[in-house]
Image: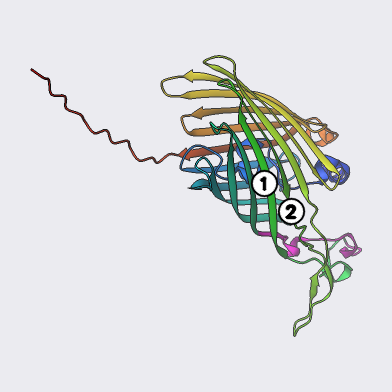
C-alpha cells in the first residue's frame, strides 16, 4: 500500500538533519546570488543583472511537492568614496510552497552592498552588504485535519479536535540578512571568492500556532512566540583557466541552522565551444553530504548564463524516493548599457 511508505517518508523528514532545517536553498547556489549572500548585490561587470531560478523537490513522492521560484534584479549604481569603490543595490523575491495545506514561506527584500577595492589595480574586492524586507508564513487552515477530529465513522469533524482554531492562517514579520564576500584575481588564469552570510539576523517571531485570545469584539487566537533561528552560510568558488578553451570551477557551500548542517561540494568544467559567438558549455557533478548527488549542466552565451540541475537522492529516503530528488532551472542576464566612445577624426595635412 502507498500509505505506509508515505508515512515513513514524513517520519524521516522529521528526523533527518538535512531535511528538518527546510529553509530556502538551491543546488545551483551560485546561480542564485541574492539568496546565497546579500553582499552579491551589484557584484558584476555591467549595468543591470536580471535572473531567476525555480526548484521542484519530492514530486516523485508526494502530490504537493516543494516548489520554490525566486527572481531578482540588481545593479551597481554609484561610485563609492574612492575612485575604484562602488555601491550595488538589489531586489529579491522568493516563495517556497509545499504540502496539501499549501504551507508557504515568501519574502520580498531590498539589499545594498558596498564594494571596497583593495590594492593599486583593484584586483581584490571586499564586499559588505545586507537585505531588509518582509517575510510571510501562511497555511490554508481549512485544509488541516487532526487525528482527534475523526469520529467513529471515519468522518472528520473539526469541532472534535482540540487543535481546531489554534492554527493561524498567516504570520508576517520583517527580517534582516547580512553578509560579506572577498574576491581576488590572483593572476590571468585564476580567481577566487569566499563569502559568509547570516540570514534571519534579528531572529523574528513567526509562529503559526495561536496562544491565548486576542482582545477585541471578535476574539480569536493571537500569534504565539517562536523565534526564527539564524542560518549561517559559508561559500566559495575558484575559477581556473586551464588553457584558451578549458576552464574548471570547483565550489563549496556549508550552512547550518539550529544545529542542522548542509555541506555541498561541486565541480563544473567549461568548454569554449564557439569563440566568435562567445559560447561556453558547462557540465559538472556535486555532492550534498549524506543526501544527494548533483548533476549539473549549463551554458554561457555572451552575457546570458543558463543552468539546470538534478538531485539524485541517496539518503535514507531512497526507500520511498527511488533515488529521485529535486530539479532546478536557472538563468541570469547581464545588461550592458555604455556610452559609445566618440573618436574625433584627425586630418593630417602633408607639408610641401
Image disc number at residue 200 = 2
* Disc 2 to disc 1: CB gap under 8 Å: no
Task: Say which quarter of the image contains residue 29.
Answer: top right
Image disc number at residue 13 = none
| Residue 108 image point, x, y percent | 61, 56
Helix, strand or loop for disc 2: loop
Residue positioned 47% across, 39% down in the render: 46
Position of residue 190 relative to residue 31, above or below, is: above
Q: Which residue is mark 1?
A: 67
| Residue 247 image point, x, y percent | 59, 20
For the N terminus, the image quarter is top right
What colour scheme governs how the chains and residues are painted in the rendered image of this protein?
A: rainbow
Residue positioned 89% across, 44% down in the render: 15
Residue positioned 69% across, 56% down in the render: 176
Is residue 321 something one can see in this rendering?
yes
Task: Say which quarter of the image contains residue 166.
Answer: bottom right
Q: Which residues are magenta?
A: 134-153
**Residue 330 part of the magenta-drawn span:** no
Which one is in front, 339 or 125?
125
Amino acid at each position: 500500500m502507498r500509505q505506509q511508505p508515505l508515512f515513513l517518508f514524513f517520519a524521516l523528514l522529521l528526523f533527518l538533519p538535512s531535511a528538518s532545517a527546510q529553509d530556502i536553498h538551491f543546488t545551483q547556489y551560485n546561480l542564485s546570488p541574492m539568496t546565497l549572500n546579500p553582499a552579491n548585490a551589484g557584484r558584476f561587470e555591467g549595468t543591470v543583472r536580471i535572473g531567476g531560478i525555480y526548484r521542484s523537490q519530492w514530486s516523485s513522492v508526494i502530490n504537493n511537492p516543494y516548489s520554490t521560484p525566486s527572481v531578482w534584479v540588481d545593479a551597481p549604481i554609484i561610485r563609492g568614496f574612492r575612485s575604484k569603490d562602488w555601491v550595488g543595490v538589489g531586489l529579491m523575491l522568493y516563495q517556497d510552497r509545499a504540502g496539501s495545506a499549501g504551507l508557504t514561506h515568501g519574502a520580498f527584500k531590498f539589499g545594498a552592498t558596498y564594494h571596497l577595492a583593495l590594492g593599486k589595480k583593484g584586483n581584490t574586492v571586499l564586499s559588505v552588504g545586507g537585505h531588509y524586507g518582509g517575510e510571510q508564513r501562511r497555511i490554508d487552515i481549512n485544509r488541516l485535519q487532526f487525528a482527534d477530529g475523526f469520529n467513529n465513522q471515519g468522518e472528520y469533524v473539526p469541532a472534535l479536535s482540540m487543535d481546531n482554531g489554534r492554527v493561524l492562517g498567516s504570520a508576517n514579520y520583517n527580517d534582516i540578512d547580512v553578509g560579506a564576500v572577498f574576491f581576488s584575481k590572483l593572476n590571468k588564469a585564476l580567481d577566487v571568492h569566499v563569502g559568509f552570510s547570516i540570514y534571519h539576523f534579528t531572529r523574528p517571531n513567526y509562529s503559526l500556532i495561536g496562544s491565548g485570545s486576542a482582545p477585541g469584539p471578535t476574539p480569536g487566537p493571537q500569534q504565539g512566540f517562536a523565534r526564527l533561528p539564524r542560518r549561517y552560510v559559508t561559500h566559495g568558488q575558484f575559477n581556473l583557466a586551464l588553457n584558451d578553451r578549458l576552464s574548471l570551477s570547483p565550489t563549496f557551500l556549508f550552512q547550518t541552522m539550529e544545529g542542522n548542517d548542509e555541506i555541498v561540494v561541486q565541480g563544473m568544467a567549461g568548454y569554449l565551444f564557439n569563440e566568435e559567438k562567445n559560447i561556453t558549455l558547462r557540465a559538472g557533478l556535486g555532492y550534498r553530504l549524506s543526501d544527494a548527488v548533483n548533476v549539473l549542466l549549463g551554458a554561457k552565451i555572451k552575457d546570458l548564463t543558463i543552468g539546470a540541475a538534478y538531485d539524485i537522492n541517496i539518503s535514507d529516503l531512497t526507500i520511498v524516493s527511488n533515488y529521485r530528488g529535486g530539479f532546478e532551472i536557472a538563468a541570469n542576464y547581464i545588461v550592458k548599457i555604455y556610452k559609445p566612445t566618440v573618436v574625433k577624426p584627425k586630418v593630417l595635412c602633408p607639408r610641401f
